[in-house]
Image (cartoon, rainbow, N blue to C red):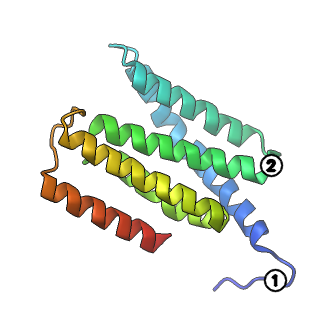
């Protein structure tokens, strides 16, 4: 059981959590990102290359610059996982890791940011999923498997409910 010492604020714990998430993301993500960058070169797949170079840059910056302001670290981290999840969901479809990454944006944000900003992140995250499902319905994505309109509606409804519940 975690007991807070007198005088220890939520800001202290948020700072510790964001630093731990950054460290873990860097340690566990550096090899897959570098392998993905290398793999995107032959044949050149510029969207994967661009997203992975962005991630490598952001996570390296966050890892190296320990003295960055908390808000900068938290919002860069949230933006990085959102972009990763959205891109991989868009490019690889509903059975790739992208949906899971996109789904964790809401609970991670709930821990790291203030409520007024959390609502904006919640709306953007859910809107991005709605855009992906609508784009799938109009064959704008090259997913190997697509949602029927009924399953798309069920998926969106479940997504919004569960991400709201976790937030």
Q: CA distance from mark 1 to mark 2?
A: 24 Å
Give 140 or 38, whichever is nearer the viewer. 140
Label 2: state its secondary structure.
loop
Q: Image quarter for residue 112?
A: bottom right
| Total residue callouts | 2
Q: Report if residue 23 is visible in the image.
A: no
Q: Residues within 10 Å of mark 1 (few under 14, many from 20)?
A: few
Classify 3 as above or below 65.
below
Name the residue: 67% across, 57% down.
18
Q: Which mark is residue 36?
A: none
Classify 166 as above or below 143.
below
Classify 11 as above or below 69.
below
Q: Horizontal and vertical percent for residue 126?
A: 41, 56
Q: Nearer the viewer, mark 1 or mark 2?
A: 2
Q: Which residue is mark 1?
A: 5
Name the residue: 69% across, 42% down.
63
Q: Which residue is mark 2?
A: 69
């Amino acid at each position: 059981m975690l007991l807070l010492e007198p005088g220890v604020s939520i800001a202290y714990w948020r700072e510790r959590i964001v630093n731990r998430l950054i460290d873990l993301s860097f340690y566990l993500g550096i090899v897959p990102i570098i392998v993905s960058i290398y793999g995107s070169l032959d044949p050149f797949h510029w969207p994967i290359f661009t997203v992975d170079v962005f991630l490598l840059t952001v996570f390296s910056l966050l890892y190296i610059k320990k003295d960055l302001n908390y808000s900068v670290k938290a919002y860069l981290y949230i933006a990085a996982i959102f972009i990763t999840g959205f891109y991989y969901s868009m490019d690889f479809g509903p059975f790739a890791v992208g949906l899971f990454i996109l789904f964790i944006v809401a609970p991670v944000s709930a821990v790291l940011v203030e409520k007024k900003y959390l609502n904006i992140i919640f709306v953007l995250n859910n809107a991005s999923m709605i855009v992906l499902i609508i784009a799938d319905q109009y064959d704008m994505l090259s997913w190997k498997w697509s949602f029927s309109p009924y399953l798309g509606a069920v998926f969106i409804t479940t997504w919004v409910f569960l991400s709201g519940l976790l937030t």
